[in-house]
């Protein structure tokens, strides 16, 4: 193993199973160091034991680039503060207090959370100017955002009440609306023109699907490449020329 160049060792470790990476960590110090880089780079299911490990070891925590958890434990805030190199964070847990993000120094590219929109979350997001992907499932209408808020946002996944606030004045190209509007509401597609970029991908969950002319949609989405509508009832089949976009409609009639 000592004869293997480091760059070759790193390439080999990229193709090793997770269980075997843990075994390689016990070979020698060199193998342990580089195997841990791969082992801790992406954590898809951070359970309580993983969170405790990251809270106790800043050396391991700083190797994490992507972290996802639905576990809420008291060490979570410390673990997040230790993950200084984090770029992707998904916190879909029962944590209602966004103060777990206080003191975090990482700069994210992608962030998803189930937090309520509090002052603590607002301050955190104001520090994330590099964020390009954002998902939030809070049902409370947020207060107006500053013009400099999340300036590089390109992909959004959220409830309908957040859509105008998040895409307005930002180069958003992909939008996923996760919850239906009210049963008596119609879709106001014009809100998608608030983005400084043209929407190319749109996925909407909606209770009733009302008649909307293809020409009207084409004028709002001139560069749309993919449209998915999950409707529970439909009054009219949306028809749009194939030259404009590709449609996937999942209608439960």
Image: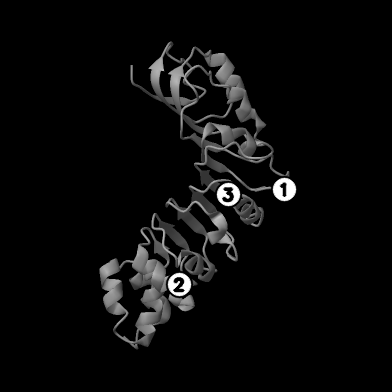
Name the outermost residue toward the right. Answer: 147
Residue drawn at 58 percent across, 43 percent down: 154
Q: Would residue 29 be found to the left or right of residue 145 on screen?
A: left
Rendering quarter of residue 48: bottom left
What secondary structure is marked by label 2?
A: helix
Which of the marked residues, 3 or 1, is nearer the chain's N terminus?
Answer: 3
Q: Foreground mark, 2 or 1?
A: 2
Which of the marked residues, 2 or 1, is nearer the chain's N terminus?
Answer: 2
Asked whether disc 2 touches disc 3, contact meaning CB atoms under 8 Å apart, the reply is no
For disc 2, the neighbor class at 10 Å (few under 14, some 14 to 19, many from 20) is many
The residue singled out by tag 3 in the image is 132
Which quadrant would the N terminus be assigned to in this image? bottom left
The front one of 85 and 105 is: 105
Q: How many circles with numbers are drawn on the protein?
A: 3
The residue singled out by tag 1 in the image is 148
Q: Would residue 128 be found to the left or right of residue 224 on screen?
A: right
> For the residues marked 3 and 1, what is the alpha-carbon distance in whole angstroms?
14 Å
The front one of 42 and 184 is: 184
**Image disc number at residue 55:** 2
Instruction: Pinpoint residue 159: horizontal percent, then vertical percent.
Output: 51, 35
For disc 1, the neighbor class at 10 Å (few under 14, some 14 to 19, many from 20) is few
What secondary structure is marked by label 3?
A: loop
**Image disc number at residue 239:** none
Which of the marked residues, 2 or 3, is nearer the chain's N terminus?
Answer: 2
Q: Foreground mark, 2 or 3?
A: 2
> For the residues marked 2 and 1, what is the alpha-carbon distance in whole angstroms?
33 Å
What secondary structure is marked by label 1?
A: loop
């Amino acid at each position: 193993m000592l004869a293997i160049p480091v760059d070759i060792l790193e390439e080999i470790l990229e193709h090793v199973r997770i269980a075997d990476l843990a075994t390689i960590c016990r070979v020698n110090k060199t193998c342990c160091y580089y195997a841990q880089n791969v082992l801790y780079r992406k954590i898809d299911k951070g359970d309580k034991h993983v969170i405790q490990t990251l809270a106790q070891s800043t050396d391991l925590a700083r190797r994490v680039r992507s972290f996802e958890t639905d576990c809420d434990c008291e060490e979570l805030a410390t673990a997040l503060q230790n993950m200084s190199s984090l770029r992707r964070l998904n916190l879909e847990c029962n944590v209602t207090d966004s103060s777990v993000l206080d003191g975090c120094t990482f700069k994210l590219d992608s962030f998803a959370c189930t937090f309520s929109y509090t002052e603590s979350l607002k301050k955190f997001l104001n520090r994330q100017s590099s964020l390009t992907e954002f998902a939030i499932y809070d049902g409370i209408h947020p207060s107006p955002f500053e013009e400099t808020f999340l300036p590089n946002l390109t992909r959004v996944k959220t409830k309908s009440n957040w859509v105008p606030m998040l895409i307005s004045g930002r180069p958003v190209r992909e939008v996923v609306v996760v919850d239906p509007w009210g049963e008596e509401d119609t879709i106001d597609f014009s809100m998608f023109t608030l983005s400084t970029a043209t929407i190319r991908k749109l996925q909407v969950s909606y209770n009733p699907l009302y008649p909307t002319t293809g020409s009207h949609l084409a004028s709002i989405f001139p560069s749309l490449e993919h449209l998915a509508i999950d409707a529970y009832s439909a009054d009219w089949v949306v028809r749009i020329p194939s030259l404009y976009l590709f449609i996937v409609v999942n209608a439960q009639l």
